[in-house]
Image (tube, rainbow, N blue to C red):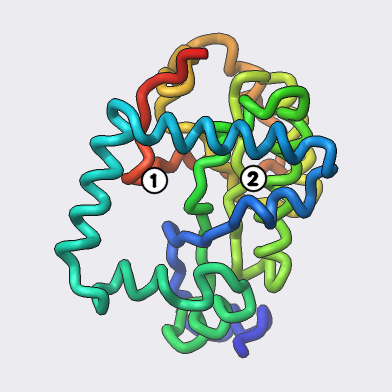
Amino acid sequence: MTTTEDLGTRELLISSDSHVKIGHDAVKAHLASKFHDAYDKAASGFMEQMNRGAGAVNQAWDTARKREQDTSAFRLRNMSQPGHTDPVARLEAMDLDGVAQEVLYCEVSGFRYLYQVEGATAEATVAFNDAMHEFGAADPNRLIVSHQIPIHDIDFAVKEVQRVAGLGGKSLQLPVFPPEVDLPDYYHERYDPLFADPGERSPDLLPHRPEHDAVEPHRP
């Protein structure tokens, strides 16, 4: 397997937009059991929202595309590989393909439902990001996971950015379109503390939109 020392000895091939699948069970493994029911309710609510309006349209489009594509298509083939869920297998696949590093986004858009985990929004967010961190821990210099930051509570968002930075995190994922989660866009002053200069240790902010999970704004 390629080591971190090898990265400085050859031309680097880096994937800036790769995906991994972190399941809800992996998240709940980092979450106190007393919050599991609330987590499941929020996750189920998100799936119900995905079946309505814009979410339903996007799901139908994604299903149709999968039906039209051959199972050997590059995208579908990669999603079926062990490295989609196993970090050690992912590193082995990267070696095979000659990839030095990957920036990894989770297939689940946690920031779309973590803020709805009743009584445990902060705890659920920390658990989600700890599950992502655990995946990258197999080799944090090569597996650059993107920790997700919900933006409903900016004070907590700032604290979570600082916590992730303390873990050595290099990448943060924010919602691309705040209005989809009933919030003003990023020009609003409420985000100023989040975008203030946090110093040299700050991870990069990388808005990223999974193409299949656009939804209608949440209406409680």
Measuring from the top left, give residue 57's x and y in whole percent: 24, 36
Judge by depth and name the residue closer to the eye, 173 or 216.
216
Residue 88 marker: none
Measuring from the top left, give residue 153's x and y in whole percent: 67, 19
- The structure residue drawn at horizontal position 50% and vertical position 80%, both measured from the top left corner, is 94
Kind of residue indicated by mark 2: Pro
| Count of marks overlaid on the render | 2
Is 43 situated above or below 106? Answer: above
> How far apart, in angstroms, are the residues tagged by discs 2 and 1?
20 Å
Is 56 situated above or below 10? Answer: above
- The structure residue drawn at horizontal position 55% and vertical position 85%, both measured from the top left corner, is 92
Label located before the other in sequence (2 or 1): 2
Can residue 186 be spotted in the picture? no
- The structure residue drawn at horizontal position 59% and vertical position 57%, both measured from the top left corner, is 22
Q: Residues within 10 Å of mark 1 (few under 14, many from 20)?
A: few
Kind of residue indicated by mark 1: Pro
Can residue 192 be spotted in the picture? yes
Q: Does residue 4 appear left or right of residue 82 in this picture? A: right
- The structure residue drawn at horizontal position 39% and vertical position 35%, both measured from the top left corner, is 50
Question: Residue pushed farthest top?
Answer: 189
Q: Which residue is mark 2?
A: 203
Residue 210 marker: 1
Helix, strand or loop at mark 2: loop
Q: Does residue 17 appear left or right of residue 4 in this picture? A: left
Q: Quadrant of the N terminus?
A: bottom right
Q: Quadrant of residue 52?
A: top left
Question: Residue pushed farthest left?
Answer: 68
Q: Residues within 10 Å of mark 2 (few under 14, many from 20)?
A: many
Q: Does residue 57 appear left or right of residue 120 in this picture? A: left
Helix, strand or loop at mark 1: loop
